[in-house]
Amino acid sequence: MQPDTYTDKTFIDASFSGEDLQDAIFERCEFYRCDFSRADMTDASFINCRFVEAGTAEGCNFSYATLISASFKHCNLSMAMFTGARCFGIELRECNLQGADFARASFANYITHKSFFCSAYITESNLSYANLESAQLEKCELMDNRWRGANLLGASMKGSDLSGGEFSQSQWGTFELEGCNLCRVELDGLDPRNVKLEGVMINQWQQEQLLAPLGIIVAPD
């Protein structure tokens, strides 16, 4: 059976709530004030789609949707609501996620109450002012994202690839980053006395930034 495919369509105030959109493909579609809450979008694909109307602050609602292995490429998802969504294996590449709310969204697959593994591919995306408080994003591909102003309080990104990311100085210490790849990241304001950095990978030029709070001067070779 061929998956449902939609191209160059515009949906305004449409409700997909609770619908089965598994494997559906949407290309160059526009969704304004649409409701995807509790929809099953497992393996669905969105390419070059817009989910917010220009000049408005109201995005689309994906609350409690199943977005397992769903893919969004070159999409504008700013101000979207992902509250409680199941996001294991989600792919968000070159997307605008400014102000998106991932409160209680799950990127993890729980084997037992305390044993889990995470999966997410969020790359080259703008996550400024997004809400990722307490998000479990361990061992995920999270490269080249703009994180400035995002709420990362209590989030765990242990073992993830955060290389090339842009962070605000005030964010350091608010989330866990042991074992992360921090190559190509400006580390100004990151104090190794206050943040656990076991297993963190950095480039040579970053040593100077990391040692500055300790008063250590790195001389050229």
Image (tube, rainbow, N blue to C red):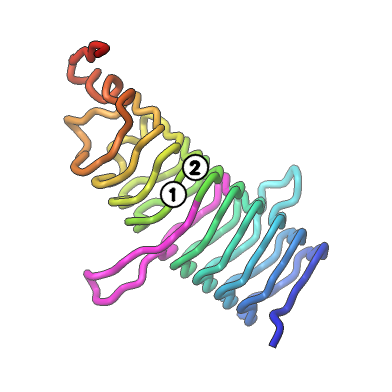
Q: Amino acid at mark 2?
A: Asn
Tell whether 46 sits left or right of 43: right
> Mark on residue 69?
none
> Magenta: predominant secondary structure element?
loop
Residue 58, how many percent across, how many down? 67, 52
Q: Quadrant of the N terminus?
A: bottom right
Mark pair 2, 1: CA separation: 7 Å
SS at badge 2 = loop
Tell whether label 1 touches label 2 (CB within 8 Å): yes
Q: Amino acid at mark 1?
A: Leu
Where is mark 1, residue-wise?
Answer: 142
Residue 78, how many percent across, how many down? 62, 49
Asked if residue 74 lies in the magenta stretch, the reply is no
Asked if residue 111 lies in the magenta stretch, the reply is yes
201, above or below 37, in the image: above
Magenta extent: 97-122
Residue at the spot 70% in from the left edge and 52% down from the top edge: 52
SS at badge 1 = loop
| Mark 2 neighbour density, 10 Å: few (under 14) some (14–19) many (20 or more) | many
46, above or below 165, in the image: below
Q: Which of the pair 65/5 is nearer the observer? A: 5
199, above or below 218, in the image: below
Residue 82, how many percent across, how many down? 53, 61
Tell whether 29 sits left or right of 44: right
Residue at the spot 66% in from the left edge and 51% down from the top edge: 76
Where is mark 2, residue-wise?
Answer: 145
